[in-house]
Amino acid sequence: LSESSRYSAGAQLAHWLTALLLLGAFTVGFYMVGLESSPTKLRLYSYHKWTGVTIFIVTVLRLGWRLCSPPPPLPASVAAWERRAAAVTHRLLYLLVLALPLSGWLMSSAKGFQTVYFGLLPIPDLLAKNPPLGAALEAVHEALGTLLLIALALHVLATLKHHLVDHQPVLQRMLPRRRARTRA
């Protein structure tokens, strides 16, 4: 695989960091909602919010990077309809990865719970306290989370299909280059 057909090291780092952060945010999010009110639950909500803020920041930086460093073209063997589907899915992923933390921020603001990033940096509320709006935004946040999980599943399944079925180097483009072993 040539260097021109691979994502840059920075793009790879941002991709895998986002994947790891999303895994953590979803895991904590699903776990925390089932807990009874407690200091542990409040701490997990803070971790979830901090992770969401970090995902938002990484995604904004990633989009800036992408404007300066366009992604490499897909292999020529990828069908035209798959190229279009990939473009739509990537745009949807970026949109959702920005919208989900934003909806969480709006929800927290409306519910009267300010986000204090890592317990140090207060993030201003975007809305005044409004419990009915907070409840509506909670439903939006959950719906966006579901949509993101579906889009992520499509992304992963498409990547695996290209890798395992079509034997196309789509996955390798986002993996660090393997170093050749030297014999002693």
Image (tube, rainbow, N blue to C red):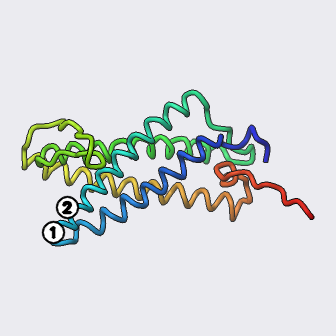
x 42%, y 55%: residue: 22
Image coords of residue 73 (percent x, y): 68, 38
Q: Nearer the viewer, residue 74 or 134?
A: 134
Q: What residue type is labelled 1?
A: Ser
Q: Which of 41 and 106 is in front in this view?
A: 41
- Seen in the picture, residue 116 relative to 127 is either above or below; the reply is below
Local crowd size for mark 2, using a 10 Å CA cut-off: few (<14), some (14–19), many (≥20): few
Farthest residue toward the top?
A: 68
Q: Mark 1 points at which residue?
A: 38
Locate residue 157 relative to residue 179 in the image: left or right.
left
Q: Mark 2 points at which residue?
A: 42
Do the CB atoms of the residues marked 2 and 1 lie less than 8 Å apart? yes
Q: Residue 7 carries which label?
A: none
Query: Split into 4 quadrants, where in the image is the C terminus?
Result: bottom right
Q: What element carries label 2?
A: helix
Q: What element carries label 1?
A: loop
Distance between the Cα atoms at labels 2 and 1?
6 Å
Q: Which of 11 and 115 is in front in this view?
A: 115
Q: Which amino acid does label 2 sit on?
A: Leu
Farthest residue toward the right?
A: 184
Local crowd size for mark 1, using a 10 Å CA cut-off: few (<14), some (14–19), many (≥20): few
Image coords of residue 175 (percent x, y): 66, 53
x 68%, y 48%: residue: 173
Image coords of residue 176 (percent x, y): 68, 51
x 34%, y 58%: residue: 146
Locate residue 7 relative to residue 44 in the image: left or right.
right
Locate residue 85 relative to residue 49 in the image: left or right.
right
- Seen in the picture, residue 69 relative to 47 is either above or below; the reply is above
x 61%, y 31%: residue: 69
